[in-house]
Amino acid sequence: MKPIDFENTSAKSPFKVPENYFEESMQRVFSQINEEIELKPSRGKLIFMEMRKWAAIFIVGLLGVGMYFSVNKKQEAEFTLEDYLSYQLQWQSVEHENMLDDDDILELEMSLNIDAVAVEYYLSRQDIEDLITEIEE
Amino acid sequence: MNEEQLLVEALKNPKTREQAFRKLVETYHKPLYFHIRGMVLDHDDADDVLQNTWVKIYRNIENFRGESKLYSWFYRIASNESITFLQSKAKKMQKTSDSLILERVEGLADDPFFDGDEIQLKLQKAISKLPSKQQTVFKMRYFEALSYEQISEILSTSVGALKASYHHAVKKIEDFLKNH
């Protein structure tokens, strides 16, 4: 058996192909590439699609921001109203307190017509034990 | 600007791309086929891989940065497509790529598209026993007649390392042929 000359690098490949394979397979490559070209959108269309995408993102973003502020404003309104009412009530009681001086209080007491005899009489008719319990409560 | 640079410019320009691509296919279709065929061994599989390779080259031509030669870029794509194809096929058959290749080598005698004699069959068996990198270097040098400089560009390996690799591969093949 003749030894192989490994330095002869123009050796023929042991593989063969069907007849006309290379011409036919090249045509298949070109057909496939043509299909790719036809399916690929034009540059103008690509730009339009990209702009449309960003417009959609912008609109959704605007809606989201709008909703966020709308919800927050409602909460803010509720908070403000509660606060206002609470503040008003506080002010009313403080206002009344501040409006009464010592003379007014004395006058009130006198109008109530409470004297010591009346108080003693009242207390004698009460169960002291009950009063003490009430106080402790 | 040299010829290759002009070709790359033509490929990147949408107006001239189709014509330039046609020229590319006409130049490299056959060598790429035999490169792939050497790896996958079966003609139908080589045909599939070759089609996929050209489509991949076409789709990625705009991303080619020109840091290497054009041919080295598509040889790399072709090699990667072949490896991926073999791995996928082996996985479906629940085998390793290596065992799939060994099986195919054993079946070459019955392959209508194998034109080799007995010594060629033994040579294919000997090559299949080499480590994968040595197989690649040997096939590219011996069957595809690529220069060490070209192989160096494709595999990103030094010429010296390639010469050593080829020399070791030859030694192992000679030993195999002596003993079988």
Image (spheres, coloured by chain):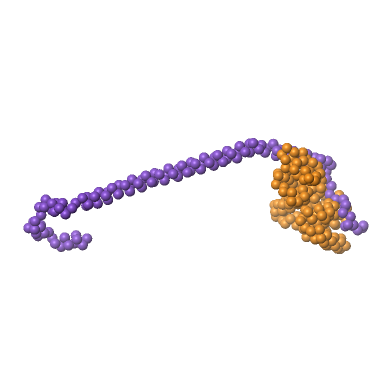
Left or right: where B161 falls relative to A104: right
Vertical arrangement, residue A132 with respect to residue B111, above or below: below
Residue at the (77%, 43%) spot, across then down: B6
Q: Quadrant of residue A4?
A: bottom right
Percent of width and height locating residue A97: 22, 52
Residue B83 in sight from this viewpoint: yes
**Between A80 and B102, the one nearer to me in the picture:** A80
Residue at the (73%, 37%) spot, across then down: B15
Residue B93 in sight from this viewpoint: no
Percent of width and height locating residue A66: 46, 42
The quadrant of the picture occupied by the N terminus of chain B is top right
Q: Colour of chain B?
A: orange
Residue at the (80%, 56%) spot, across then down: B137
**Between A28 and A64, the one nearer to me in the picture:** A64
Percent of width and height locating residue A61: 51, 43
**Between A105 and B25, the one nearer to me in the picture:** A105
**Between A90 and B90, the one nearer to me in the picture:** A90
- What number of labels is visible? 0
Percent of width and height locating residue B56: 72, 46
Left or right: where A104 falls relative to B57: left
Q: Quadrant of residue B167?
A: bottom right
Residue at the (75%, 43%) spot, across then down: B9
* Name of the residue lying farthest toward the right: A2
The quadrant of the picture occupied by the C terminus of chain B is bottom right
Q: Colour of chain A?
A: purple
